[in-house]
């Protein structure tokens, strides 16, 4: 009987390790589980990791708008793209974010736990220095360039 518990713990550790190595976008897909592809324990663990990475907003929205330098409105953008732009330094904690569900603008720091973004980014880079999701990174760089050119 005890060996089943050991096997279960080993499986949970493998799952946790796999999810920790997942890209932010993959975690969000697991959390939403729109197609019911993932077991409950997977979505729960993905949500915990998503929270620790600052991917869960204080609001139910999945897309947001930003007011950037020069007063330019950008969006709709998802949390992964907003995080990438933030980590590139093109926006900061005081950047205004439009929350459509309540039709109101808030500073970024009130919508997302940005204090987790830098820490999560450092952890991911140290564990996977060459593990870059080029599609997301390229889109973030394009948007960052647009934002900085305004």
Image (cartoon, rainbow, N blue to C red):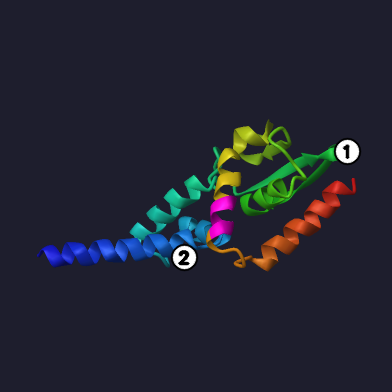
Residue located beneath label 2 in the image: 35
- Left or right side of 6 for 137: right
Q: Position of residue 137 (x, y in %)?
A: 70, 61
Quadrant showing the N terminus: bottom left
Residue placed farthest to the left in the image?
1
Residue located beneath label 1 in the image: 70
Nearest to the observer: residue 43 or residue 89: 89
Mark 2 vs mark 1: in front: 1
Q: Position of residue 131 (x, y in %)?
A: 60, 67
Residue positioned 88% across, 38% down in the render = 70
Magenta residue span: 121-126
Specify whether residue 30 is painted magenta: no
Quadrant showing the C terminus: top right
Mark 2 / mark 1, whichever is N-terminal: 2
In this picture, is 30 found above or below 50?
A: below
Q: Main secondary structure of the magenta part?
A: helix
Q: Is residue 2 visible?
A: yes
Badge 1 element: helix
Residue positioned 80% across, 59% down in the render = 142
- Left or right side of 148 for 119: left
Q: Is residue 33 visible?
A: no
Residue count near mark 1 (Cα–Cα under 10 Å), binned few <14, some 14–19, many ≥20: few
């Amino acid at each position: 009987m005890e060996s089943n518990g050991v096997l279960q713990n080993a499986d949970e550790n493998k799952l946790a390790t796999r999810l920790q190595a997942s890209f932010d976008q993959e975690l969000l897909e697991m959390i939403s589980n729109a197609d019911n592809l993932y077991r409950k324990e997977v979505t729960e663990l993905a949500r915990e990791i998503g929270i620790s990475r600052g991917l869960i907003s204080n609001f139910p929205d999945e897309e947001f708008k930003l007011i950037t330098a020069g007063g330019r409105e950008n969006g709709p953008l998802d949390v992964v793209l907003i995080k990438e732009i933030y980590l590139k330094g093109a926006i900061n904690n005081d950047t205004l974010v439009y929350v459509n569900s309540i039709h109101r603008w808030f500073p970024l720091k009130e919508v997302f736990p940005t204090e987790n973004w830098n820490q999560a980014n450092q952890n991911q880079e140290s564990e996977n220095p060459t593990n870059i999701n080029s599609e997301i990174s390229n889109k973030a760089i394009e948007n960052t360039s647009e934002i900085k050119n305004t």
